[in-house]
Amino acid sequence: MKAPVWLTIGILAAAVGPALADNSYQNTCSNIGFVYSGNNAALQAVCLRTNGTPNATQLVLQGISNQNGKLTQGTGASTFQQSCGNIQIIVNGPNSLLSALCRTTGGSSVATSLSLNNISNNNGTLQQ
């Protein structure tokens, strides 16, 4: 037996609607990755608006620095991209990480990561 169209639409709206309001941008965005926006480090994605249409969006990452080979969250402009390489966004279910190889004060490089779970999809636009 086929479900009425209005029931199917209602179920889809209930499934998508709440995800657009919380910090689980990974549930409603695709093609998530790291990019440079000028000299700034940024997260890019294609995110769904509340009406279900896709929107290409970027968010400049703020306050992230490299402290002796460790990514740390602070305030102001991000500076980690000046001393880190192999920068990636890793999405694993509801979690996303900024991952990189960062230089230490001794000159070696170490793998480090930082949670990016404070980002949300606001009607198709990434926000922090």
Image (spheres, helix red, strand yellow):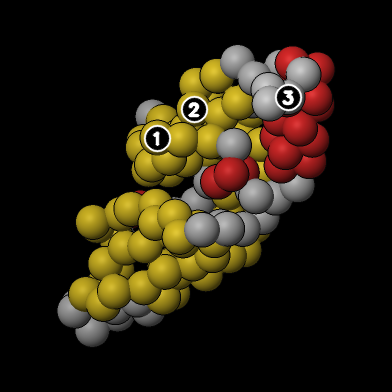
According to the image, label 2 marks what residue? 46
Judged left or right of residue 28, residue 69 is left
Crowding at mark 3 (Cα within 10 Å: few <14, some 14-19, many 20+): few
Of 32 and 3, the residue lying toward us: 3
Instruction: Provide the secondary structure element on which disc 1 rests.
Output: strand
Q: Position of residue 79 (x, y in %)?
A: 44, 54
According to the image, label 1 marks what residue? 31
Q: Comparing marks 3 and 2, which lies closer to the viewer?
A: 3
Q: Amino acid at mark 1?
A: Asn
According to the image, label 3 marks what residue? 3
| Residue lying at 39% horizontally and 52% vertically, measured from the top left | 89
Residue that sits furthest to the bottom in the current view: 106
Q: Amino acid at mark 3?
A: Ala
Q: Position of residue 126 (x, y in %)?
A: 62, 35
| Residue lying at 59% horizontally and 44% vertically, measured from the top left | 27
State whether residue 42 appears in this view. Answer: no
Q: Position of residue 44 (x, y in %)?
A: 45, 34
Q: Are the residues flagged by discs 2 and 1 in contact, CB closer than 8 Å?
A: yes
Of callouts 3 and 1, the N-terminal one: 3
| Residue lying at 39% horizontally and 56% vertically, measured from the top left | 90
Q: Position of residue 123 (x, y in %)?
A: 71, 26
The N terminus, quarter of image: top right
Instruction: Provide the secondary structure element on which disc 2 rests.
Output: strand
| Residue lying at 74% horizontally and 16% vertically, measured from the top left | 5
Of 29 and 6, the residue lying toward us: 6
Of 96 and 13, the residue lying toward us: 13
The C terminus, quarter of image: top right
Residue 52 against residue 93 in the figure, above or below: above
Instruction: Provide the secondary structure element on which disc 3 rests.
Output: loop
Q: Amino acid at mark 2?
A: Val
As measured in the structure, the alpha-carbon distance from the residue carrying label 3 to the one carrying label 2 is 30 Å
